[in-house]
Image: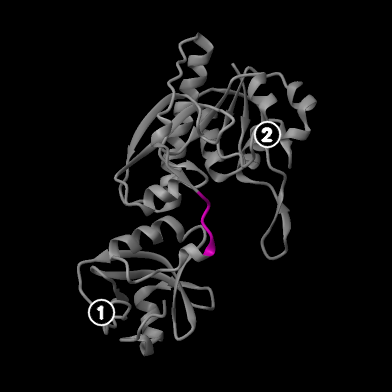
Amino acid sequence: MKVLFLGSSQFSAIVLKVMLQEGINIVGLITQPDRPCGRGHRLTPNNAKILAEANGIPCFCYDKMKEHKEEIEAIDYDISVVASFGQILPKWFLEHKLCINVHPSLLPKYRGASPIQNAILNGDGVTGVTIMKVAMEVDSGDIILQEEYKMQGEYYSQLELALGKLGGKMAATAVMQAKDGSITFTPQEHDKAVHVQKFSKEDGLLDFNNSAAALENRVRALSELVGCYFMIDGQPIKVVKAKAIDEQLEKGVVGNNKKRFIIGTSSGALEILECKAPSGKTVRGQDYLNGHNEILGAKVNV
């Protein structure tokens, strides 16, 4: 089976790498064009494209895939696999040949742009991967394969890696099922669909009126992407890593403890394990306190 792969993210690269390891014949990659990156705004390829080029896979970079119908239909492939591509696929492409998607959640739960973040944010104990036939409505297609993954307190990048590896193996299995004719399609229970959107910088604000467990989940879900932060005396402190602890303090107050950077919540306290000062350097929470004793006992601005 000749597979055309569509993807533009780190998750895409993880899935693609595993599929190659599984011996799947990837004949081309459709991906987003190189984007400006870093302080110099230098055009930089995404991780999926970097991996594809390293493996000699032809790359087709389209800002708007719908404008390249003839070129795409001329590609010699049998089935397409999509993983975090970032564009709505045109109807003619879905009708051309079978197109399947690698989605990192247990559909119909968490349809949309942020399934991994929401699984962490909501404190789910179990998430997983769904392989589905792509339909015009986002993440609504028939299920081909579905497998659970037991969460173990991962941060976003850790869970992305685990689900990407699982998804790559499952996608390889689905391709082989398509080859031998054993592939099956099961309609989703659409009335149980949960839709999720992208997160913004504002979503990273830590509200200490919430519980310590909820705040830890928010840090694990969002600190690596949009960033998590709180304010003291008008200065933002970015939280890189944190954990909920069973200690009671006044809500929003920094504990008067030089050895542990802890802040009271509505239930328990949040220990700041790693943070960034306004200068941008990441330090241990305890080390930050050593240089900022003035915040001991201070109230967080929310």
Q: What amino acid is at disc 1?
A: Glu
Magenta span: 197-201
Residue 163 point in image, percent of width and height: 43, 39
Q: Residue at horizontal 32%, vertical 60%?
A: 214
Query: Which element is circle 2 on?
Result: strand
In the image, farthest residue toward the top? 181
Q: Residue at horizontal 32%, vertical 45%?
A: 151
- Residue wearing tag 2: 30
Magenta span dominant secondary structure: loop
Residue 138 point in image, percent of width and height: 55, 36
Closer to us: 88 or 230: 88
Placement of 108 over or under 22, stated as above or below: below
**Residue 13 appears left or right of 111:** right
**Residue 13 appears left or right of 299:** right
Q: What amino acid is at disc 2?
A: Ile
Q: In whole angstroms, how far apart are the C-alphas of marks 2 and 1? A: 53 Å
Q: Residue at horizontal 67%, vertical 19%?
A: 96
- Residue wearing tag 1: 250
How many residues crowd around disc 1 within 10 Å: few (fewer than 14), some, or many (20 or more)? Answer: some
Q: Confirm or deny contact between disc 2 and disc 1 (CB under 8 A).
A: no
Q: How is the image coloured?
A: one colour
Q: Residue at horizontal 34%, vertical 77%?
A: 286
